[in-house]
Image: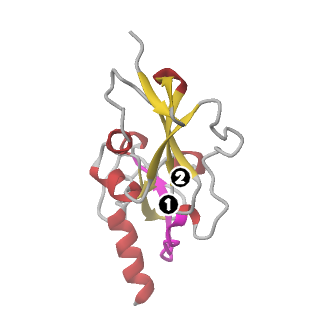
């Protein structure tokens, strides 16, 4: 069975379509295959699917999802980067002195502020600014590019910056 969605006034095979997530600055920060099986037929269902955790949904809520054909998708521009200031149309989060961003569990999609400096492997991993605990923290920038900031860590960093 082939499902069709209307694209530019014409019925198009659903397999030839993507939902593109546009950040407030206009950059594409996510994409998702349109799917009849997965129920991803509307912009709202694409947003719900892409931000299945409440923390991701809260961060990505300003996204606008638009249907776009694979042929029209700007593959050259979609590199997971944003040249704008502020990046992704969001104000920069101040990094507290003595802290750095790290990812605890990439599947959860969150970055946390952890104490910076070398890791002492004879001790448990340090807690994040928000109190989150992990067995290890990944400080690699590539891992961080695929995640969003923990809103609790961000709020605490803002508070510290204003003090």
The residue beneath circle 2 is 139
Q: In this image, 16 relative to 108: left or right? A: right
Q: Secondary structure at mark 1?
A: strand
**163 vs 105: above or below:** below
Numbered label attached to residue 159: none
Q: Is residue 8 magenta?
A: no
Q: Secondary structure at mark 2?
A: loop
Q: Residues within 10 Å of mark 2 (few under 14, many from 20)?
A: some
Chosen colour scheme: secondary structure
Please say whether residue 24 is visible from this viewpoint. Answer: yes
Q: Are marks 2 and 1 in contact (CB under 8 Å)?
A: yes
Q: In this image, 9 relative to 76: left or right? A: left
The residue beneath circle 1 is 101
Which residue sits at x=54%, y=24%?
A: 16
Q: CA distance from mark 2 to mark 1?
A: 7 Å
> x, y (%) of residue 130?
31, 65
> x, y (%) of residue 86?
58, 70
Q: In this image, 87 relative to 135: left or right? A: right
* Residue numbers of the magenta segment: 89-104
In the figure, residue 83 lies in which quadrant?
bottom right
Mark with earlier residue (2, 1):
1
Nearest to the observer: residue 22 or residue 13:
13
> x, y (%) of residue 159?
37, 82
**91 vs 145: above or below:** below
In which quadrant of the rendered image does the N terminus lie? top left
- Please tell me whether the stretch drawn in magenta is mainly helix, strand or loop: loop
Which residue sits at x=58%, y=64%?
A: 87
Q: Residues within 10 Å of mark 1 (few under 14, many from 20)?
A: many
In which quadrant of the rendered image does the C terminus lie? bottom left
> x, y (%) of residue 74?
66, 41
Nearest to the observer: residue 100 or residue 162:
162
């Amino acid at each position: 069975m082939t499902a069709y969605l209307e694209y530019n006034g014409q019925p198009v095979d659903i397999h030839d379509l993507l939902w593109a997530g546009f950040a407030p600055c206009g950059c594409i920060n996510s994409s998702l295959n349109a799917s009849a099986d997965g129920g991803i037929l509307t912009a709202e269902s694409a947003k719900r699917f892409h931000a299945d955790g409440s923390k991701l949904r809260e961060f990505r809520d300003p996204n606008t999802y638009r249907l776009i054909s694979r042929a029209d998708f700007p593959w050259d521009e979609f590199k997971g980067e944003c040249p704008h200031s502020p990046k992704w149309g969001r104000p920069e989060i101040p990094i507290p002195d003595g802290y750095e961003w790290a990812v605890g569990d990439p599947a959860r999609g969150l970055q946390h502020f952890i104490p910076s400096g070398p890791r002492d492997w004879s001790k448990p991993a340090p807690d994040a600014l928000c109190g989150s605990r992990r067995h290890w923290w990944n400080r690699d920038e590539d891992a961080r590019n695929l995640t969003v900031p923990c809103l609790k860590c961000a709020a605490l960093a803002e508070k510290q910056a204003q003090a």
